[in-house]
Amino acid sequence: MTDGITTTNGKTTTNAVIECILSRTAAKYYDPAGTLSDSQIRELVRIGTTAPTSFHLQNWRFIAVRTREAKARLSPIAWNQPAITEAAVTFIIIGQLADSSVVPERLAPLVEAGIMPAKMVPEWELPARGLYKDHPQRQRDEAVRTATFGAAAMIYVARSWGLGSTPMIGFDDQAVHRAFGLGGDEVPVMLLSVGLERPGNWPQKPRRPVADVLDLV
């Protein structure tokens, strides 16, 4: 394995993005003294939300659990995982059920910016309606996809900042709904802790060989 791309001339070039991805690991140990400012949290989410979403729905929401009180509220309904209290912040990564009726609103900034012609908006809204309107499973699938794309982007942003991150699925989703006031159309897809790591975390674990997971057809 190399930390770069082999070009047509046979040379391998390093790439900061690839190195960031290859060095990422799920952190277990955080320095409780490490903090993130609210402006850093906002910037992390801002960059994370440049991830792709179907029909530009942007059907996600993020709750940044960073105060002592909020951490104490989340911890017992998330298996008392240490990262929740020790990391600087734990995001509740929320996907919203895909709703085609919001497509015109979400596309309006593209039209205003001159990126998309106004006449193209119905060309996006109509197929979105056909895909999701009467299909609750597809709505939920899209919520999970969207939230996961956003969380993945935030993971790599955090790594590029020299921070650790831990995605977690160990929590009571109904309790999270109640404790943090999620809407009926919202799905808590995962928790994502981000913070300053302390010594003892493992390097990235070996993965299955590409030959075991790739078919070239």
Image (cartoon, helix red, strand yellow):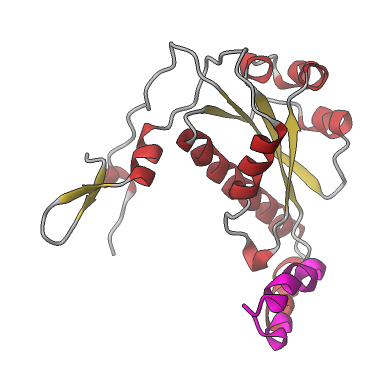
As drawn, which residue projects farthest toward the left? 9
Residue 84 sits inside the magenta stretch: no
> Looking at the picture, how far across and down is residue 63, in whole percent?
76, 36
Range of the magenta residues?
100-122
Q: Is residue 124 left or right of residue 23?
A: right
Residue 117 sits inside the magenta stretch: yes
The residue positioned 64% from the left and 36% from the top of the image is 40
> Which of the image's four quarters has the C terminus?
bottom left
Viewer-closest of 147 and 164? 164
Tell how many labels. Answer: 0
> Looking at the picture, how far across and down is residue 58, in whole percent?
69, 58
> Looking at the picture, how far across and down is residue 152, in whole percent?
54, 43
User: Is the magenta region chiefly helix, strand or loop?
Assistant: helix
The residue positioned 72% from the left and 80% from the top of the image is 121
Viewer-closest of 216 and 124? 124
The residue positioned 63% from the left and 13% from the top of the image is 82
The residue positioned 72% from the left and 85% from the top of the image is 118
